[in-house]
Structure formats: C-alpha cells, structure tokens
Image: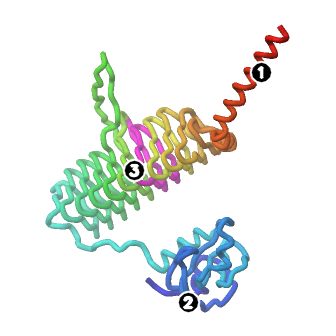
Amino acid sequence: MQSRTLQELANHVGGTIKGDPETIITAVGTMDSAGVGDITFFTNKKYESKLKTIEASAVIVPGDVETDAALLIAADPYYALMQIAVLIYGHRKHPQTGVSKKAAVSDSATIGDNCQIGDFCTISDDVKIGNNCIIYPGVFIGPEASIGDDCIVYPNAAIYNKTVIGDRVIIQSNASIGQDGFGFATHEGIHHKIPQVGIVVIENDVEIGSNTVIERATLGETRISEGTKIGDVVAIGHGTKIGPHCLLVPQVGVAGSTTLGHHVVLGGQVGVAGHLKIGNMVQIGAQSGVSGNIPDGKILLGTPAIDPGITKRIYATMPQLPEMRKKIKQLEKKLAKLEKSNG
C-alpha cells in the first residue's frame, strides 16, 4: 500500500482538485468508514447528506459539492476510484513457485514461460498453456484444452477437454468450464443422454465467478465473448452465445442455444429461457423471467419480464388486492340487485 498526495491522484485520473493538493491519501474507504488519510467517492444523490458529516480527507465527486473534505472532481468518480485503488493497493499478488512437483503434468502438455502451477493440479495430454499464467492448487485441465497468456485459474476449477480460453481470463474457484450440456432425448418416458461433442470458447478478458458452470455445446460451440464478466453461481446452457462486454450478476441462468448481444446486463437471479435472442444493450432487472426475444436497448423487469413502469404499478397494487376483491364482490351484489329491480 502506497501513500499519495491528492495532486498525484488527480494527475493519475485526469481530475481537478478543490482543497489542499498536498493532502496525503493512504487508503480508500466507504463514506461511512473513511477517516483521516482516506479517500472515498460520491455518485448517488441519495447519499448527499453524508457529505456534510464524512470524516474522509478527500472525496471523489462528479462536480462541486458542500463538504469539509477536499474534492477530487472527475467525470466518472467510480472509474476514478478504481484507478486510485489499483494505484494504492495494486492487484492480488500470486505465488511465484514455478511448476509444483506435486502437480501431475502430462509429457505432451505445453507450458509457457513464467507459469505457476500449484500443488495437485492435473494438466492432461496435449494441453497448451500460454505465458505468465497462474494455476492454483487442485485445478483440473482436460485433454487438448488451451489457455492463452496472463490467465489466472483459482483453486479447484475444472476445465474440460478441448475448451479454448483466450488471454487475460480469470476463472474463480470451483468454476466448471466445458462440462456436458443438459441434453436428453426422451423416448417412451425414458431420458436418453445425448453426447455433447461441441466445445466452449472463452475470449480475451473474460472473468468467470466461483461455482459458475458453462456447458459445452451439443454440436458446435458455447461462446463467451471478450470483456464479459460473469458472477458467482451462474449457469450458461449448451450452445449459448454471450456477446462482448456483458454483465451477468450472480445466480443468473441462461438456457441453451440463447444468444445475447453486446453490453447486456442481467440482474441477480434472472432466468432466460432457451433458443431466444436478446438484443444489444438490454438490461433485465433482478429475479426477472425472460421467455421471449427482446429487441435492442430494452429495459425490462418482472416475471414475465415487461416494462419496469408497468411492473412497479403491478407490485404497488398487490397489497390492495384483497380489499379491491372485497369491494368488487360488493359491487357485483349491488349490480345484481339493480338488474333484478329493473327487470
């Protein structure tokens, strides 16, 4: 961890300062926890009142605000916070132990320069691993799988045969990449397993969360495109195509043969049915169920996923439904009496 002056931080992120540029910053904190020597950030007006009571030495803001702390004004405060956190803390340091004698590495595997292979890893026949990769203990990499440069695979992840992984990919612990797709032919009440002979392709700069599963295609490939980030406990079905720079929040499920465009955001526990097409820049709110195609740019919420304004009105009405039902029954009785008297 390295201390910096506020001026140094502003220069690093391309921001401007209001206050003492020689303020020393040693750490990054939240608005509630930050104290002297810390820098925090402000982007949500809901927390504006906290600016008057924060104890941080500085705060990253999108514009001038009222606070006793020094200001670092940046166009994108959250991105500036990321840059500052990297500058002060750096990323996780990985063990530099070379290839462990306790790892099982096939003679036909190819390991690049400066790779770290942990204890009890299994590197199968004809595996190719690029340069500067970190493979933590307990990882299994199946036959003919390939991994690019600068990748990190955390403990106990399983990468099945013939999986193709690009550069700078991060796979968190216990993820399963390339397992059999959920494919069965039901005949006379019996479910018969269909051989899953396709592969998984993961492009550059993808991150895959812990306990996430990505199924190999029945035929062809399941593909996760560049820059996409997938959270923990996510299930990606066989033959699915995830476009570039998507965000899949934890506990999302995407059924097989569905295609997502670029920059799609799926909130927590979203379920997407199979054989659908989700357009570019689509956003789906948490716990929504998607059962049909969605055009570009839509923002949806609910089950089924519909316009969020309608969904919110529906949810707001739910507590009133018992009383509304009671009133409707009363009106039906009155209407019946009127019809009888008029008859």
- Residue 298 is covered by the magenta coloring: no
Q: Residue 324, how many percent across, how many down?
A: 69, 33
Q: Gap in Å between the C-alphas at discs 2 and 1?
A: 76 Å
* Position of residue 111 in the picture relative to residue 78 (left or right): left
Q: Secondary structure at mark 1?
A: helix
Q: Which amino acid type is shown beneath numbered disc 3?
A: Val
Q: Is residue 39 above or below residue 46?
A: below
- Using the image, determine if residue 63 lies above or below residue 231: below
The crowd level at tag 2 (other Cα within 10 Å; few <14, some 14-19, many 20+) is many
Q: Quadrant of the N terminus?
A: bottom left
Pick whichever of labels 2 and 1 is earlier in the sequence: 2
Point out the tag, 3 or 2, that comes first from the N-terminus: 2
Where does label 3 land, which residue?
Answer: 233
Magenta region's main secondary structure? loop
Residue drawn 52% across and 51% down? 246
In the image, which disc is placed on residue 24? 2
Label 2 sits on a secondary structure element that is strand
- Most extreme residue toward the top is 343
Amino acid tagged 2: Ile
Q: Which residue is mark 1?
A: 334
